[in-house]
Image (cartoon, rainbow, N blue to C red):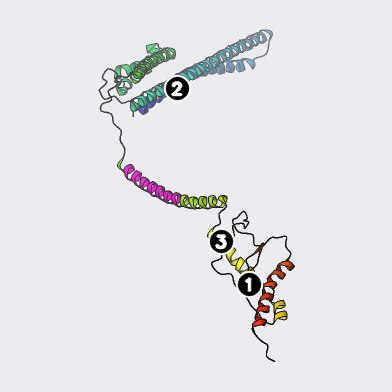
Amino acid sequence: MSEILDENFGSQYALQVALQTMKERCQQFQKRLDIAERENASLRVKCYRESSTAMLPATGDNQITELQILTDKVEQLTRIKTQLTHHIFMVANENRQLWKRLSRLTKTNKNLGNHLNKISDALQQHPSTQPLEALSYNMRLDFNLSKNESDQFLVPADLESNETSLEEISLKLINSIKMEKSELEQQYAEMVEMQNTSEINLQNMDYFYPESMNSDCMEQLKQHDTRLSHTKHILLSQQTKLKTIMGKLKTIKKGAMCKSCRDNARKKMCQAGTQFNSDDSLKENGATQTSLIPNSTTLPENMNYTTDGCSEVENKICPMCEMIYGKTINCAEFHEHVLSHFSDEEKSLGCDFEIIQ
């Protein structure tokens, strides 16, 4: 409120100065108009006289008098012209001076406003617990001037009676503004010193948080806790999966076979023992005899293993005597070896039984 009152006071004072100058100019123009009207009246009288004399017969003396009258008129007009030009020049100078003074006043007002804003910000940022009577600055008392002081600053109604010019008034204004500015600067320096000193009473100072913020913070903390617990469960499940995978990788690196690979190897070996060429045996012998590998058969230790731990199925094993043949042996030789077992059995059967015709 004090800043608004100060700005209003400065603007009102500037308007009063401008109105007073306009009033002075109007008075001067009125005086000049009166003088010009008198001169016009005198010139009209002279013109009437000259017109009356012109009706008289023209002689040599009359012509001389007319020339003198005209020269006098020209001189008077030139004088009036010079006066008017001088007056215009004076008015232009006054206008320039007034504009300069108004610009200075506006600058000083802005500087004062900036100083006041700085002081108010400093007071808000660093409120003192103890009352500062020595540094308290009542802006209303300074700017709400008394009648006598306002009469001194205000422009008088009659400049002719008081014999004071606008320059004196402007000087008074500038001096008063400088005094106020110096006082404000002193107060600002004192506030800065108080701000820099470490002897400020901080016992009664405390932090304050609104109640609405507490509830919001609790809700946010709960949500954050639930998210952290969820991520914890996910990480634990991933940890268990990784442990199982690492165990399997270690077993594969050691060369051991997993359960599924062992079962597949046994099934393939059983199928290889049972699937032999049954057509040739039926043609030659007329009977079919099959034999299966018992479940108690164990895998040989010399069996080669691949990188995934499974056995090589390409090795040939005899289903009767469980003899292992490598890859180099031909299928024909392996087939003959298997059929040799059946031929021996046929001979033994033929000796024991007689064929009835």
Q: Give the side of residue 151 with respect to residue 97, left or right.
A: left
Give the residues in magenta.
212-236
Q: Residue 136, percent across and down? A: 29, 20
Q: Give the side of residue 144 with respect to residue 271, left or right.
A: left
Residue 223 in view in this figure: yes
Q: Give the side of residue 348 with respect to residue 218, left or right.
A: right
Q: How far apart are marks 3 and 1 (CA)?
A: 19 Å
Q: In what element is the residue under mark 2?
A: helix
Q: In what element is the residue under mark 1?
A: helix
Judged by depth in the image, the label closer to the viewer, 1 or 2, is 1
Query: Which of 190/166 is in front?
Result: 190
- The three-letter code of the residue at mark 1 reads Thr
Residue 274 badge: 1
Query: Which of 3/351 is in front?
Result: 351
Judged by depth in the image, the label closer to the viewer, 3 or 1, is 1
Residue 106 badge: 2
Q: Residue 166, percent across and down? A: 43, 15
Q: Which residue is drawn at 56% across and 18% down?
A: 44
Which residue is denoted by mark 3 in the rendering? 262
Query: Against 165, is 308 above or below?
Result: below
Query: Against 163, is 216 above or below?
Result: below
- The three-letter code of the residue at mark 2 reads Thr
Furthest-front residue in this view: 351
